């Protein structure tokens, strides 16, 4: 073979090798992009199994492409947002950071690691770790996660009670990222934090700005609820008006037969729920007062609404959670035995359930799978009329004997005690129910005097809604009540055998 021919063959071989290398690199990259696009489409359609298949193919077979870190981020978001499996979510975000520390997904991974901590931390003790992860997002200049990190920083500071710092973080979103998806939420956050700092005028201004700037959105609806609530307690008195309610004469939930033996009334986004012990059922009415459905219950005593808006029905020997019956077992001499005299139950944001059993005279804490974690806050015998969970996971308990209201943190630390008898912050004759609104205000119903005592988020007495301020004669024998997002009160009056809305 001539030298010229050997050179030509060599060049052809080199070109084939180079082209083959480009092909080998280009095809997987393009294929990875297509799988990511396909997975994102499936995800948006709610077809999560198919979406995960696409993302996993990229991670396992195309880890060397520029889309692998994006796939890990999407997998982590699935486990965080859909499954709420914090361990798997954390694992996926950490994998993205270990394998691709300078990739496009790295700031997003730090942001979501902060979210994992924020959402899974029941006691608030790890919020500084969440804040640290949000701060790491800013190490990557100009990345799209910055407004989200600022917003979540404000939310974490708000949870810690650092309200002015929260306002500063929220304002940074509003000023520096006014067109981001987080600006409306940030303005709501400024309003919430302003309420907690005793600045109601600033709060109302912020809520009105949300309504003006983001009309016809869910954020505008939330702003209106807050505006209504804050105006009632602060705006009206500033204008020389008293805090007062008026009976809504157009709201008349009714049935063919009158209500019988109503033990509890609770409000959720889906309607007004009434537990009739006598007829062993829970009835739901829509906001217009029309019956929307009924649910049978074997032997119901208590009713609550969890942070996701799901009903928790306390039957005597079990609970109804997510529409299905569940039994709860405790250790006994001859082996585990079920609770027998359940009177009330609540579920927190992370799925833990607190059950008051009248035979045990204790509140018992169970994990999301139904395993007993122990008595709450301790093993001291106690009798309970009602329990609520606030937005921070604190338990607010109305005691049966003393009719005091006590507040415990999620780890069982006593935060407050409101004495309702003579010598306390307020004197009530017969406290019979409690309710919490979104601003953290606590309402205590006095059955015998047909009045409602209101306490602020620091559990200091704010006002007492007497028969006069509730509308003369509107209430006669109120036995149970709740409050909605705008501060409207829903009360079941046993003498009138009616549900009354006060707004």
Image (cartoon, rainbow, N blue to C red):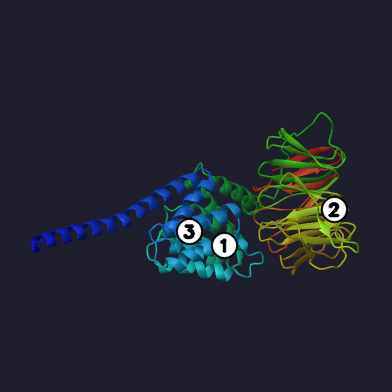
x and y percent of residue 433 in the render?
80, 52
In the rendered image, the quadrant that contains the N terminus is bottom left
Q: Is residue 368 above or below residue 497?
A: below
Residue 27 locus on image (x, y percent): 33, 52
Label located before the other in sequence (3 or 1): 3
User: Which of pointers 3 and 1 indicates the residue nearer the eye?
Assistant: 3
Badge 3 is on which residue? 72
In front of the other: 59 or 79:
59
Q: Nearer the viewer, residue 181 or 70?
A: 70
Q: Which residue is mark 2?
A: 342
Residue drawn at point x = 58 percent, y = 48 percent: 222
Which label sits on residue 145?
A: none
Question: Residue 389 location in percent, x, y?
Answer: 72, 57
**Residue visible at 82% across and 50% down in the picture:** 318
**Residue 128 point in image, percent of width and height:** 57, 71
Label 3 or label 2, whichever comes before in sequence order: 3
Q: Is residue 39 above or below residue 200?
A: above
Q: Would you say 477 lies left or right of 195 here? A: right
Using a 10 Å C-alpha cutoff, classify the residue at mark 3 as few (fewer than 14 neighbours), some (14 to 19) or many (20 or more). Answer: many
Tell me which corner region of the image, top left, top right, bottom left or bottom right, holds residue 221.
Answer: top right
Q: CA distance from mark 2 to mark 1?
A: 33 Å
Residue at the image point whose x is 84% and y is 33% from the top = 258
What kind of element bears circle 1?
helix
Left or right for 174, reference 309: left
Determine the CA span between mark 3 and mark 2: 44 Å
Compare marks 2 and 1 and give the one earlier in the sequence: 1
Q: Residues within 10 Å of mark 2 (few under 14, many from 20)?
A: many
Which of these two is toward me, 22 or 329? 22
Q: Which mark is residue 116?
A: 1
**In this image, 31 relative to 251: left or right?**
left
């Amino acid at each position: 073979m001539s030298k010229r021919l050997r050179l030509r063959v060599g060049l052809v071989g080199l070109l084939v090798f180079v082209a083959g290398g480009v092909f080998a690199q280009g095809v997987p990259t393009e294929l990875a992009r297509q799988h990511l696009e396909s997975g994102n489409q499936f995800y948006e359609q709610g077809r999560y199994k198919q979406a995960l298949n696409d993302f996993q193919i990229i991670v396992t077979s195309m880890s060397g492409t520029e889309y692998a870190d994006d796939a890990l981020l999407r997998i982590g978001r699935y486990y965080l947002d859909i499954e709420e499996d914090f361990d798997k979510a954390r694992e996926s975000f950490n994998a993205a950071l270990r394998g691709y520390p300078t990739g496009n997904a790295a700031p997003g991974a730090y942001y979501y690691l902060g979210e994992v901590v924020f959402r899974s931390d029941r006691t608030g003790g790890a919020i500084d770790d969440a804040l640290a992860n949000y701060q790491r997002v800013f190490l990557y200049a100009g990345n799209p996660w910055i407004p989200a990190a600022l917003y979540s920083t404000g939310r974490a500071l708000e949870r810690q009670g650092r309200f002015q710092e929260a306002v500063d973080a929220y304002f940074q979103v509003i000023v520096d990222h006014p067109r981001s998806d987080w600006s409306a939420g940030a303005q709501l956050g400024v309003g919430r934090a302003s309420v907690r700092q005793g600045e109601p005028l600033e709060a109302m201004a912020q809520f009105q700005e949300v309504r003006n700037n983001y009309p016809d959105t869910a954020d505008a609806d939330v702003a209106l609820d807050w505006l209504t609530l804050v105006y009632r307690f602060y705006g009206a008195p500033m204008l020389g008006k008293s805090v007062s309610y008026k009976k809504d004469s157009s709201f008349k939930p009714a049935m063919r037969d009158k209500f019988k033996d109503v033990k509890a009334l609770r409000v959720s986004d889906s309607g007004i729920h009434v537990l009739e012990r006598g007829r062993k059922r829970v009835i739901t009415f829509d906001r217009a007062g029309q019956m929307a459905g009924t649910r049978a219950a074997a032997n119901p005593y208590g009713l609550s609404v969890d942070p996701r808006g799901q009903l928790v029905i306390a039957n005597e020997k079990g609970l109804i959670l997510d529409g299905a019956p569940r039994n709860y077992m405790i250790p006994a001499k001859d082996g585990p035995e079920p609770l027998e005299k359940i009177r009330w139950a609540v579920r927190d944001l992370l799925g833990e359930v607190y059950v008051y059993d009248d035979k045990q005279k204790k509140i018992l804490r169970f994990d999301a799978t139904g395993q007993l974690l122990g008595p709450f806050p301790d093993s001291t015998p106690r009798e309970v009329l009602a329990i609520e969970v606030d937005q921070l996971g604190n338990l607010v308990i109305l005691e049966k004997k003393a009719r005091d209201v006590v507040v415990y943190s999620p780890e069982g630390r006593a935060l407050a005690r409101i004495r309702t008898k003579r010598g306390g912050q307020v004197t009530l004759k017969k406290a019979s129910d409690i309710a919490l609104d979104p601003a953290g205000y606590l309402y205590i119903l006095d059955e015998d005097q047909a009045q409602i005592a209101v306490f602020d988020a620091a559990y200091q007495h704010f006002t007492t809604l007497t028969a006069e301020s509730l509308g003369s004669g509107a209430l006669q024998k109120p036995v149970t009540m709740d409050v909605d997002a705008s501060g409207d009160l829903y009360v079941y009056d046993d003498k009138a055998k009616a549900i009354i809305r006060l707004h």
